[in-house]
Image (spheres, helix red, strand yellow):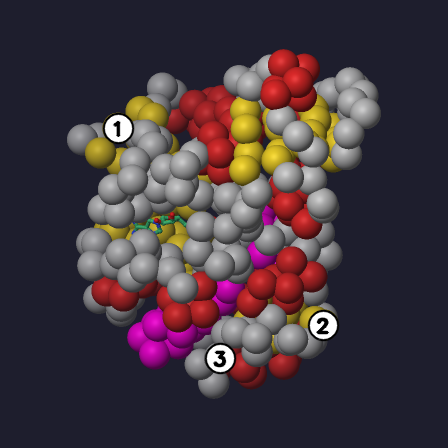
Amino acid sequence: MATIGKDILKASQLLEQGKLVAIPTETVYGLGANALDTTAVAGIFRAKNRPTFDPLIIHTYSIEKAREYVTKFPPELEKLAEAYWPGPLTILLPKKNVVPDLVTSGSNNVAVRVPKHPLALQLLKGLYFPLAAPSANPFGYISPTKPEHVNKQLGNEVDYILDGGACEVGIESTIVGMEDGKVCIYRLGGLSIEQIEKIVGKVNLKINSSGDPTAPGQLKSHYSPIKKLVIGNVDELLKRYDNPGVLNFGDRNYDVYTYDLSRDADLTEAAANLFQGLRSLDESNVEVILTELLPEIGLGIAINDRLTRAAAEK
Ligand code: TXA
Ligand code: MG
């Protein structure tokens, strides 16, 4: 098991030595390493058992700093960065040569983000390199939203876990980029489509499910519990399955083990509780997890994307 603590100096010293440190962000915990050090980055892929065709996001602390790693920052994407950094927004931009190909899986674009968490920002400001950090979970499994989640799954792989408490947003960042002069969304996340369109107008959604590993971030089966997750009318499903548990949104009551995402049907609260809920049910003694899709508005769209991928056949 790794040590969990709030020692930023220790975290930065380990990172300077090329070690892996789990870092808190407002979305989920990241598995961080020096993004400019290929050996350190290779350690991330090894620890997560992640295929190297799945590229990594680099994290830094300001727009000015981000410019050091990219050759171009189109005005539309800059407007988004000004509006939402620090925050749950990742931007795909043409990379400079300092960013190793391993980080981008050979792509000319690098994904950049400024996380909104005081400990992460303080850490990043003190480092002379950006941090490559995917979510700190084994590839394909549920993302961690608490330090204990990281320790349970990757405790033997990381050298330190920086404790920033429970993640406020609870689902990963929204990923945007430009294609043919238009802003595109490649992954739904903690920043809603409405929030993005408020700044840049209508965007293209490119978030299709795919089993194709050449479509990064769009793998069909992802965020998955070990137990079977079934989406549908829960009252109907309860008649069909033995020993079920329910992931519930709203104030309904069931006489089986139930994890409430939000009794008040609040989508922000549900996002923050989503991965903890899947984990709690996965670790309980139920045999199957039943749930319904949430309203397709605001964060509900990103939550439904996660649920659908978590329920996909592996
Ligand atoms: O909220 C988040 O984004 C969290 C925290 C830790 O920052 N990070 C995160 O990283 O979710 P990860 O690696 O679990 O998911 C990042 C996704 C991947 O699916 C990857 O394929 C896509 O971003 N991605 C990264 N770099 C890319 C690139 N250069 N081109 C296309 N997709 C990219
Ligand atoms: Mg991930």
Considering only vertical position in the picture, is 153 above or below 195? below
Q: Which mark is residue 20?
A: none
Q: Mark 3 is on which residue type?
A: Lys
Quadrant of res 131 = bottom left
Q: Nearer the viewer, residue 64 or 94?
A: 94
Find out whether the residues at labels 2 and 3 contact each other: C-beta distance under 8 Å: no
Q: Nearer the viewer, residue 260 or 18?
A: 260
Q: Please indicate, yes or no, whether residue 144 appears anywhere in the rendered image.
A: yes
Which residue occupies 47% across, 85% down?
Answer: 17
Give the mark nearer the N terminus: 2 vs 3.
2
Which residue occupies 54% across, 38% down?
Answer: 228
Quadrant of res 97 = bottom left
Q: How far apart are the two marked residues, 2 and 3, measured between alpha carbons?
A: 16 Å
Mark 2: which secondary structure? strand
Considering only vertical position in the picture, is 11 above or below 141? below
* Quadrant the C terminus occupies: top left
Q: Mark 2 is on which residue type?
A: Gly
The verdict on label 3 being within 8 Å of ligand 1 is: no
Find out whether the residues at labels 3 and 1 contact each other: C-beta distance under 8 Å: no
Give the mark nearer the N terminus: 3 vs 1.
3
Q: Nearer the viewer, mark 3 or mark 1?
A: 3
Q: Which mark is residue 182?
A: 1
Considering only vertical position in the picture, is 232 above or below 132? above
Q: Is residue 139 left or right of residue 229?
A: left
User: Is disc 3 surrounded by few (<14), some (14 to 19) or many (20+) residues within 10 Å?
Assistant: many
Q: Please indicate, yes or no, whether residue 72 appears anywhere in the rendered image.
A: no
Q: Residue 261, percent across and down?
A: 71, 32
Q: How far apart are the two marked residues, 3 and 1, measured between alpha carbons?
A: 38 Å
The residue tagged 2 is: 5
* Quadrant the N terminus occupies: bottom right
Magenta-drawn segment:
23-43
